[in-house]
Amino acid sequence: MNSLTSRQRKIVYALAILVLLVPIIYLGAPLSTDVQPGRKTAVTGGYLAKMRHEYELGESTLGDIDPSSAAANLVLLGLRGIAASALHQNAIGYQERKDWGKLKSTVETILRLQPHYVEVWKFQGWNLAFNVSREWDRVDDRFYWVKEGLKFLQKGSQRNQTATILFHNVGDFVGRKIGNSDEKKFFRRFFVADPDEEQFDGRADPGINEEGVDNYLVARDWFLRANERDDVYPVKGMTREVFRKSPGQAMFDYANAISDEGKFDLTQKAWEDASDYWNDVFGNEIFYGLDDITYKYNSSPEEIEEMARQNGVTLSVQKETLNRRTKMINYSFWQRLSACEQDPNTVAARKAIFAGKKAYGNGDISDRIDENGELQISTAQAFFEDGIARMQKMFVLHPDTNNHDEKILDAMGAIAYWQDIHKSNGKKLDPADPLTEFATNFLKSHRRYQGESAKRFQQENRFTDF
């Protein structure tokens, strides 16, 4: 090199720079998208930029941070983690002071700093939907913040396509918070007909329910997406069977919910669909137990023998593995419950109790004297007596329901209405009546449910719209 003239060295340096520019441009060129009507969107750029786009590793949202904020100053100094921690503290302070506007904007800033930190999405989505919503008195205001939590989680799933658990969490929130909360009577209705009529004109908020369907069906769809991603990006930190059964569980919850709401024209098919998915789809998936012993829940005796041979274990070990895992998720119970719900006696019991509640809500609870001078019990009492008698029969025909919380609470609820109707008419229950004997013994044997039963009775009668 020393033998080269100054001019020759400059030429060599220039050529070396040009040669080095080729891999730099190939690897590091920025991403560019070409969007033209009628054509497929083209994504061009360097190899690394394309990989960041494909695996969603980019941090393009950092530019959305307020440049005058303290967080921006920390980011510029390379202290993004400290900035996020400070913002978390600010968010907690805003929540305690009930400054909801600043809380929302602060949470959004946190996510621009940490768009791929899954725990932030999970915690703040839960916080908005469960904690912040409870700070409001009006049910429609609570629903607004529940929606904010759901939208927050949905955004997290969009930004983190490989975070399988986020898709599952969205389904869990849609099902559990909308369908199981104390305000479920309102939330389920608001989910398909948003209370903000000015903005949504009596339709569902498309941000959480684009098709305007039942919340449990939306939950099912999110769970199905989660299962699809689980095939590629296996979920961590959750028992696989518990994770994979979620679509079927949502379908069972849907069938049960519409049965409670008296939509009996839909219930038969809903229970059939749930049962089919439980048996034919989830029941035929292959799972791994201890020592990598494979099994599936919907197995015939011949299939159990074949899987024992494939696993290289004895038939008794194979059966023990299957039995233990079956009990873990109550697989057989849900099969039997579905059969119970499709039993004509159970359907008739549900119809009678629903009709009784409707008559109770309409005030048809007074005894009357007919044209022959005979005492006739109220319409509500007649329906409840029919429903309670049929539930008594159900507990005998389907013994598993004796240990099912919802079935026990359904029966206790019907008994509570029946007792209240007698009290309103100034009557005492007849100790010699077989129905009174059943009701008395049933309440005694399920005392631990009395608090929850009383709570439900009060909630149902705050606003009656059967």
Image (spheres, helix red, strand yellow):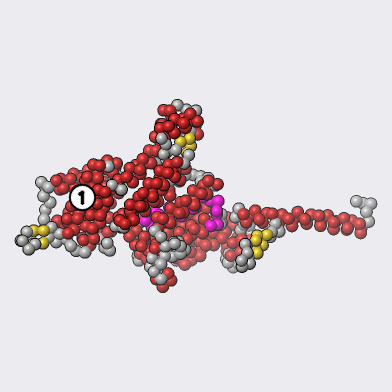
Return the x and y of residue 152 as percentages of the image width and height: 48, 59
Q: Residue at x 24, y 45 (%)?
A: 394
Return the x and y of residue 404 as percentages of the image width and height: 30, 45
Please check the rendered image and state whether residue 308 is part of the magenta-colored stretch, yes or no: no
Q: Residue at x 16, y 48 (%)?
A: 435
Give the labeled residue for mark 1.
388
Report the magenta stretch's main SS.
Answer: helix
Residue occupying the far top of the picture:
314
Q: Quadrant of residue 128?
A: bottom left
**Is there any visible trace of residue 321 in the rendered image?**
no
Please check the rendered image and state whether residue 166 is part of the magenta-colored stretch, yes or no: yes
Residue occupying the far left of the picture:
373
Type of amino acid under label 1: Ile
Q: Residue at x 8, y 58 (%)?
A: 375
Return the x and y of residue 37 as percentages of the image width and height: 61, 68
Return the x and y of residue 167 as percentages of the image width and height: 49, 53
Q: Residue at x 42, y 44 (%)?
A: 280
| Left or right of 424 on screen, residue 122 | right
| Left or right of 37 on screen, residue 237 | left
Q: Nearer the viewer, residue 107 or 388?
A: 388
Quarter of the picture holding the C terminus = bottom left
| Left or right of 423 on screen, residue 228 | right
Region rendered in magenta: 158-179
Helix, strand or loop at disc 1? helix
Total labels: the figure holds 1
Q: Nearer the viewer, residue 164 or 122?
A: 164
